[in-house]
Amino acid sequence: MDKIKCDCGHLNPYGTIICEACGKPIQEESPDKLLNMRYEGTARRSQTYNTNAVDKVWNFFSSVKVGVWLIVITLIASAIGTIFPQQMYIPPTVNPAAYYEEEYGMLGEIYYILGFHNLYSSWWFVLLLGLIGVSITVASIDRGIPLFRSLRNQRVAKHDNFLKKQRMFAITKRPEDEEQFMEEILFRLKEKRYRVRREGNSILAEKGRFSRWGPYVNHVGLIIFLLGSMLRIVPGMYLDEDMWIREGETKAIKGTDQEYYLKHDKFTFEVYDKKEERFSDALNRVQQPVPKNYQSDVTLYKADEKLPGAKPELSEVKDYSIQVNKPLDFDGYSLYQVDYRQEMRHMHFELQNSETDEAVGSFSVDLLNPKDEFDLGDGNRVELQGYYPDFYFDKETKKPATKTNIPNNPAFIFKMFTPETPEGEVAFIAIRQNLDPSGDNQYKVAFDGVETEFITGLTVKKDYTLPIILIGGIIFMLGVVQGLYWNHRRVWVKVKEEDVWMAVHTNKNWHGIRRELDDITGKLNMNQLVDQQEESKKA
């Protein structure tokens, strides 16, 4: 669209309300109405163009209402994400889909299907963050560029209508010695730390212009913050994985692409002694033992280059004792001690005569790698025909089943062979259960003890996005300080044939600038500024 040429000769973009140079109102309104100085009356793209698809998209995202609604929707989604625990807080061995349905019913199932269980990395939540970033960027460009252009182009001498329609305005009789008056008012304004420019009989005094960019600095900080948050879904930028490792086990560290391995040498668990004087009162009020320390003594290995399918050669990197808040740091990764548990590892059994309970042999089952058959000697042997590490009875199939591969509640189906029973006898053994399906077995398998071992729970963390988020937060706070503690103040003085006109504008804190200028006008015997907005309300 054609630009608008003002009487002063300046070419203004289409849609401009106030000439960027001289301030003459281009679109004349009511003579008593004050000028709208928001964005200096310059043309904004969103308020000017609305013809093609690009314009409509631009106008949509430049709307403050749209930005606010996007933030509100994101906050509501974040609040819903706290109703049930996030996936990182549920047992790592369970199936999330089954867990949420079993624990919370239909609401839990919907919660899982919509991705609330892993909210902050779900595609739609990241999309919301991206849309907020787009809205902030478009709104900043839509308002920031016109404001910059207007402040850069402003002249010292302003049109009379511009001065009269400022909120604070005063007219004083022209002094006899005009030059002395101009020198004195220049001195007084400089004394108040204004940057002063003079052109003939006009003066422009300005200070605190940088505060106008405070909101835009906020926006830059927010965009960097959102970018850092969104980068967490990029592989290699962020990692937060749990891993469980048994004593004596060597395991590839999650998220390292099998480059690093960890061997769990020993787990140490210590509790506070209730006889310890410092904490005896508190400890005696608690029935359960209070952990004092639990740590994992580990060895870190790095895998050498290997052929595809070949077992990697491991080179020792270092030994370390991981404790709570004392992680193992290496190559950008951190291993934190977060949990531990004791698991059953071996269960011991005896093959006994059902009537006399006389033992004819014993055997042990490795719960992680059970054998199929146990030879007890003298023609006695036991076959393992079924093993259910986490036993439950499936009501639909009416058969025993297992929830997980973790030996939380082991159950077994044994077939026993002895010289007296060459055809074999079947027994079902579980914790506190010893069933004889036929009801006439001559022999039985009896529980004879259990061995447990510690398993340590570690969290593998890597976060390259944290510095980006931190920089965004710092920039945002700088913008808050910049816009909160300073304000943009301007004073225009114009000496006419019989009068001296003074007009004032600030983006905020009108009381402060009025008090500041009342001091100047009092020393120069000028009339005090009148707040025309307040006067119109009284009228």
Image (cartoon, rainbow, N blue to C red):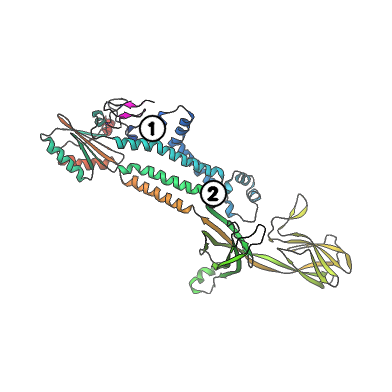
- Quadrant position of the N terminus in the picture: top left
User: Whole-Å distance between the Cαs marked 1 and 2?
Assistant: 36 Å
- Left or right: where does residue 356 sit relative to residue 14? right
- The span picked out in magenta is 1-21
- Quadrant position of the C terminus in the picture: top left
Of residues 194 and 386, the one nearer the viewer is: 194
Can you tell which of label 1 and label 2 is closer to the viewer?
2
Residue 11 in the magenta stretch? The answer is yes
Q: Which residue is drawn at 45% across and 48% down?
A: 225
Q: Residue at x 76, y 64 (%)?
A: 371
Residue 266 position within the rendered picture, expressed as x and y whole percent measured from the top left: 60, 69
Residue 219 in the magenta stretch? The answer is no
- Answer yes or no: is residue 354 visible: no
Which amino acid type is marked by label 1?
A: Arg
Residue 471 position within the rendered picture, expressed as x and y whole percent measured from the top left: 42, 51
Vertical comparison of 383 with 81: above or below: below
Q: Earlier in the sequence, mark 1 or mark 2?
A: 1
View extreme (left): residue: 176
Residue 226 position within the rendered picture, expressed as x and y whole percent measured from the top left: 47, 46
* Secondary structure of the residue carrying numbered label 1: loop
Residue carrying label 2: 234
- Answer yes or no: is residue 372 visible: yes
Vertical comparison of 247 with 74: above or below: below
Which amino acid type is marked by label 2?
A: Val
Q: Quadrant of residue 302?
A: bottom right
* Secondary structure of the residue carrying numbered label 2: loop
Helix, strand or loop: magenta stretch: loop
Of residues 31 and 530, the one nearer the viewer is: 31
Residue carrying label 1: 44
**Are there few (<14), some (14-19), or many (20+) residues within 10 Å of tag 2?**
few
Q: Which residue is drawn at 59% across and 52% down?
A: 87
- Left or right: where does residue 329 sit relative to residue 356? left
